[in-house]
Amino acid sequence: MLSQIKDIAAPLAPRLIEIRRHLHSNPELSGQEYKTAAYVAGVLSSCGLHVQELVGKTGAIATLPGTGEDSRLLAIRTDMDGLPIQERTGLDYASQLPGIMHACGHDVHTTIGLGTAMILAQLAVQQGGLPGSIRFLFQPAEETAQGASWMIRDGAMAGVSAILGVHTFPTIPGGSIGIRYGALTAAADDLELIITGESGHGARPHEAIDAIWIAAQVITTLQQAISRTHNPLRPVVLTVGQIQGGRAPNVIADQVRMLGTVRSLHPETSAALPAWIEKIVASVCQMYGAKYQLNYRRGVPSVQNDLALTQLTESAAAEAWGNDRVQILPEPSLGAEDFSLYLDHAPGTMFRLGVAFEDQPNYPLHHPQFQVNEVAILTGVVTMAYAAYKYWFHR
Ligand SMILES: [Zn+2]
Ligand SMILES: [Zn+2]
């Protein structure tokens, strides 16, 4: 079956590159993917798939029905949004929109979703149908971690038995696949902390409660406590990225507000973090007489790749491209991915698609010069289509 899939995919490659370049030139920000979704719906309809538009606000869903021999439903999720970044690649198909860029490879992901749909639709015709049904999820607003929850709210995961996803990765060579067992990405939560002291003359600190000094103590204590009270094999990263307070050099500040991000990999660690942070904040503030308000907002959980489905994608990639083009990734990323929200509804796995060049510099995701080695598109669609095919024979 792999050779049939490759035979269908090879002549589609130029068309897929054309699709990807069209998407790359016309990026849309999170939650505004109207033209992208309409374009996606057009391509899917032309393959004979039934498309539901405006699912998850600006997302789309298409279904390839199976023969019913297998009652399971497999979902394939790709994301569609660009980023508020001014592109500086100099490519002739660079973004035509000032200040918006596909700098996270979601143009490639969308293309892979479309290419996989094209391949599997043709394969279904050749085979007289695939055993079970496949639902293609084209998700908006991944960068703002909103889109997956919008899709789920609109029923995208109803009846789904398993879900597959893909993300480009600029440190893996183009044409190779990265497989990660267990945690792929981190849980990412937001933190807002307001510390309130009492203003006073800068020369008489004993008559005031210095919110800036107490904020410094809180930050230092939190960082030291991570190092000394957490299991170092279960990482936590706490970054205070923004801090504001005070009005004049000789006036003691009565209030400081700080904003931060908190990352962790293990679900038990993530669950314990809000209470642990509050305990430290409360004890430092109490020691020096300050009040505090802590707003801890849960973001997305960690992506935990399912063992059996990860074995499935690994074997699909290894059969398709050989073991030397499959890397087992030893480490997760502390980035976040809202693919994790789907995993509350069905097991799933996300693989990394290598997009690095051998002969030119490679820039990280979200960089204004981020570029994709387009050989990866064929690698991605064949791997995804073959993994989806193998799913029906894998229990
Ligand atoms: Zn991104
Ligand atoms: Zn991304």
Image (spheres, rainbow, N blue to C red):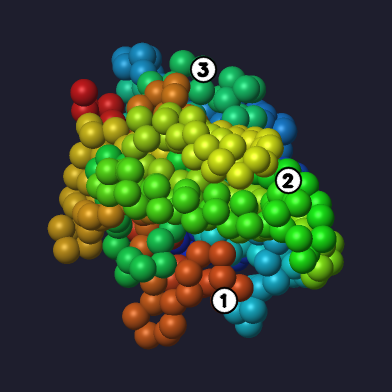
- Nearest to the observer: residue 135 or residue 353: 353
Q: Give the position of the C terminus as an image quadrant.
A: top left
Question: What whole-number distance in Å separates the C-alpha atoms at marks 3 and 2?
Answer: 50 Å
Rendered position, 249 above or below 319 = below
Query: Residue 129, image x and y in percent?
Result: 37, 26
Q: On the picture, is 62 further left or further right than 86?
A: left
Q: Which residue is mark 3?
A: 158
Which residue is identified by label 2? 197
Left-right relation of 48 to 331? right
- Residue at 42 percent across and 39 percent down: it is 302
Placement of 364 over or under 259, stated as above or below: below
Tell me the crowding category of disc 3: few under 14, some 14 to 19, or many 20 or more residues within 10 angstroms, Cα based. Answer: few
Asked whether 283 or 148 is in front, the reply is 283
Q: Secondary structure at mark 3?
A: loop
Tell me which corner region of the image, top left, top right, bottom left or bottom right, holds residue 42.
Answer: top right
Identify the mark nearer the N-term, 1 or 2: 2
CA gap between label 3 and label 1 equals 39 Å
Q: Which residue is mark 1?
A: 369
Residue drawn at point x = 81 percent, y = 52 percent: 199
Disc assigned to residue 92: none
Residue 304, position in %: x, y? 34, 36
Mark 2 CB near ligand 1 (8 Å cut): no
- Name which residue lies at 67% across and 41% down: 290
Q: Nearer the viewer, mark 3 or mark 1?
A: 1
For numbered disc 2, what is the local secondary structure? loop
Q: Residues within 10 Å of mark 2 (few under 14, many from 20)?
A: many
Residue pictured at 57% horizontal, 76% vertical = 369
Alpha carbon distance from label 1 to label 2: 45 Å
Indicate the secondary structure of the residue bearing disc 1: loop
Amino acid type, residue under disc 2 in the picture: Gly
Q: Quadrant of the N terminus?
A: top left
Q: Nearer the viewer, mark 1 or mark 2?
A: 2
